[in-house]
Amino acid sequence: MTDYSKCSLTRFPAPVLSQRAEPVGEITDDIRCLADQMIDLMVETEGVGFAAPQAGVNLRMFVVSLDGTRENARVYINPEMEVFGPQIAHEEGCLSLPGIYTPISRYAKCKVSATDLAGNRFTEEAEGLLARALQHEYDHLEGVMIKDRMSRPAKIRARRQLKQLIDEFNAGSAS
Ligand code: NI
């Protein structure tokens, strides 16, 4: 039994954000509690998606809600992703990398198969902002963040911000 209701937002460079997450086993009450907490954190921080590693939990699961509301939040457990079409660059941010907004190339379309909280497998085809959000959140499960996908000049521009996050993280873990 893990009390996921106490999870909070993790920021770069927390190690959990750069690890490949583990598959979710049975959909237990704990997993439902974690999904709830992830949706709360997404709504609080005004995000449109939230992956379990961002709650400090190394599991393959994320939530997406394009309008940032709880009502429209959809939970994706053990997702599999296929991508299609040309890549399009568009500005993205990440709750775990505050202060960084940078163009990221994503595929125009994708198809996700995942398990929902009732344990049912579903498939969803997406394009536009939804396709982008799904690819961003899926990346989190592979330990990949926008800092890993941004161009070299963008990374140089973000250097000070990344350094500040590292300093904040080290100050936090020291106290
Ligand atoms: Ni993110």
Image: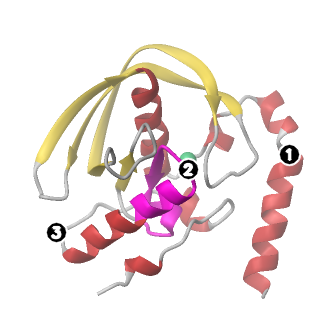
User: What residue is drawn where x is 18% and y is 67%?
Assistant: 27
* 3 or 2: mark nearer the eye: 2
**Can you tell which quarter of the image residue 77 is in?**
bottom left
Residue farthest top in this picture? 86
Mark 3 lies on a secondary structure that is: loop
Mark 2 lies on a secondary structure that is: loop
**Can you tell which quarter of the image residue 164 is in?**
bottom right
Q: CA distance from mark 3 to mark 2?
A: 29 Å
> Please, is residue 119 above or below residue 74 in the view?
below
Looking at this view, is 4 or 143 the one in front? Answer: 4
Q: Is residue 123 left or right of residue 11?
A: left
Magenta highlight on residue 44: yes
Magenta highlight on residue 12: no
Earlier sequence position, callout 3 versus callout 2 = 3
User: What residue is drawn where x is 74% and y is 42%?
Assistant: 100
Checking the image for residue 46, the label placed there is 2
Amino acid carrying label 3: it is Glu
Q: CA distance from mark 1 to mark 2?
A: 25 Å
* 1 or 2: mark nearer the eye: 2
Residue density around tag 3, few if under 14, some if 14–19, many if 20 or more, within 10 Å: few
Q: Identify the residue under disc 3.
A: 26
The number of numbered discs placed on residues in the rendered structure image is 3
Checking the image for residue 35, the label placed there is none
Earlier sequence position, callout 1 versus callout 2 = 2
> Please, is residue 87 above or below residue 74 in the view?
above
Q: Position of residue 4 (x, y in %)?
A: 39, 77
Specify the quadrant that holds the C terminus.
bottom right
Q: Which residues are magenta?
A: 38-58
Q: Identify the residue under disc 1.
A: 159
Q: Are marks 1 and 3 in contact (CB under 8 Å)?
A: no
Specify the quadrant that holds the N terminus.
bottom left
